Image (cartoon, rainbow, N blue to C red):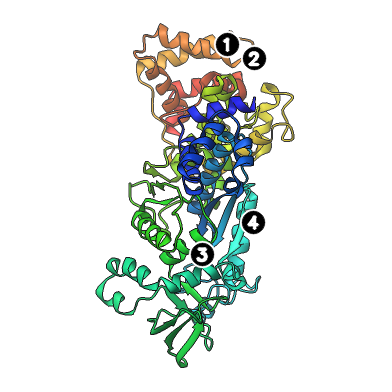
Amino acid sequence: MLQNLEILAREAKSWPFEQARNLLAHVLKKRLGESERAEARALIDAGKADEALAKFEALRRPVVLETGYGPSGLPHMGTFGEVARTTMVRNAFRALTGDHWRTRLIAFSDDMDGLRKVPEGVPNPEMLREDLHLSLTRVRDPFGTHDSFGAHNNARLRAFLDGFGFDYEFMSSTETYKSGVFDATLLTLLERFDAVMAIMLPTLGEERRATYSPFLPVSPITGHVLQVPTLERNVEKGTIVFDDPAGGRTELPVTGGHVKLQWKPDWAMRWVALDVDYEMSGKDLIESVRESGKICRALGGTPPEGFNYELFLDIEGKKISKSKGNGLTMDEWLRYGTPESLSWYMFQSPKSAKSLHFNVIPRAIDDYLAFIESYKTQEPAKRIDNAVWSIHAGEPPTHTSPVSFALLLNLVGVANASTKDQLWAYFAKYLPEATPENEPLLDQLMDRALNYYEDFVKPSKSYRLPDDKEKAALLDLAERLKALPADTTDGELIQNEVYAVGKAHEFEPLRAWFGALYEVLLGASQGPRFGSFAAIYGLPQTIALIEAGARGELAQA
């Protein structure tokens, strides 16, 4: 079975498996010579990754995947997307190598950066203003709950990632700099200072070039992270000399947390020091990845494998900006959608720009549910490329929700429901065995449907009057439904009658008939499978709704 999974992973077409194969090729090339690489690859392709690991000591180091986080603000949609997508690649890599290879996912927090500006929407901004230029782990916590602003945001990041069940190792920039983890690589950078400067200076403007240094010393007097030129460097002593505005000419070691690197050299230094094999980033960082890769090579390392994903757009097709607030926050998505629906959305076409707005949530929920249903009957080669395989690491749930989110939204509107108890009452006949305990996802979706309907659907409801042909068809449908048992919960039986009426009244195409049902009865251009909706809402109530729509009462309300 395991070997079969490895074979499927080699042939899978979805992007996490393409990335996993690229990562495997990268690691083999990085760690082995050409002849060893060919032998190791042959073993892995034969489903014998364990033998390759046993034979080649260089392969026994874990494969390291990294994601970065800037804790000057709270975790956001981009944070989730990067960790979720990297986790999908990690899961695909495990399948590709028979899960013999040890992997690590590092969530790295750049909490040693200086606070350059006061973020919006944070309490006690005056206190933060007083702490400008201090490392984030030395800036006082405006929320009053942690030792520093950085510690507060790191705690939020970890709670955020833990809440989604991600498997990761947290690393703090402050702790890794101070503990000496980076010391050896920092000393290498000091030795190769000129090579790093030769890479960086052509990328900077004239004014910035005059003062640029890859080293940002931390003032021993003020604690400020200083952007000042390096006046002297002593490779043997491992120190730099700079002009501290608070204390004049100062010499500090580059080790032990006395300096922080500028972010591009810092990124490259981390790749070397942590032996990072994979890191993805947004399309806006393509040039930065290239420059950091050059610095990584100058330090004697190998830049990691990875790819650049497209950025999200708002409803008007404009780039999302945190400062403009024209996108969705995590809390907003989770008010209206499930975590799994967000993972599904992140899986889809990461190299294509997509709208990230409230209007994508209902479709994302129902598409996720549909992919779960498809997975149940797919052959293995199709299953592994199904998004839910990557979302759930090959073990998607066997049961989700018995009804769609679209149906729930319409049920909320037609029933004028404001509580879950009202919605559950409609399911008492349709699904008599269902409870919030044994249908937890349905219960969650009810919460989201109530929220979404109240905030977005209700304000935009627009019923219309039926034309003469539609009116005759609606009255015909009402009469046909009256001939059915009043207590029927057979959605398929009801749906057959809906089809029959559409054909009898010669709607061409037939979807025009369903469009009329949605627009006249539900006040929307689209809707759920009408038979299922009627079965849950109740046949007598549905008949009354149809007759009211035929009389034009809904449009006049």
Determine which residue is flagged by label 1: 493
Residue 460 x, y percent position in the rendering: 43, 40
The alpha-carbon separation of the residues under discs 4 and 3 comes to 15 Å
Determine whether 199 is above or below 250 in the image: above
For the point 25% across and 74% down, which residue is it?
206
Residue visible at 56% across and 51% down? 64
Classify residue 46 by image quadrant: top right
Going by the numbered disc 1, the residue's amino acid type is Leu
Q: Nearer the viewer, mark 1 or mark 2?
A: 1
For marks 1 and 4 on the same chain, the one whose residue lies earlier in the sequence: 4
On residue 159, the disc is 4
- Residue type pointed to by label 2: Thr
Quarter of the N terminus within the rendering:
top right
Secondary element at image label 1: helix
Nearer to us in this view, 496 or 168:
168
Depth order, front residue of 4/205: 4
Upstream in sequence: badge 2 or badge 3: 3
Q: Residues within 10 Å of mark 4 (few under 14, many from 20)?
A: few
- Say if mark 1 contacts mark 2, CB within 8 Å: yes
111 or 267, nearer to the observer: 267
Q: Is residue 463 above or below residue 450?
A: above
Give x and y (percent) for residue 529: 51, 22
The secondary element bearing badge 2 is classed as: loop
Q: Secondary structure at mark 4?
A: helix
In the rendered structure, which disc, 3 or 1, sits on the residue that comes first in sequence?
Answer: 3
**Spatial distance from mark 2 to mark 3, Cα to Cα?**
54 Å
User: Pointer 3: residues within 10 angstroms few (<14), some, or many (20+)?
Assistant: many
Task: Name above or below for residue 393 compared with residue 469.
Answer: below
Amino acid carrying label 3: it is: Gly
**Amino acid type, residue under disc 4 in the picture:** Ala
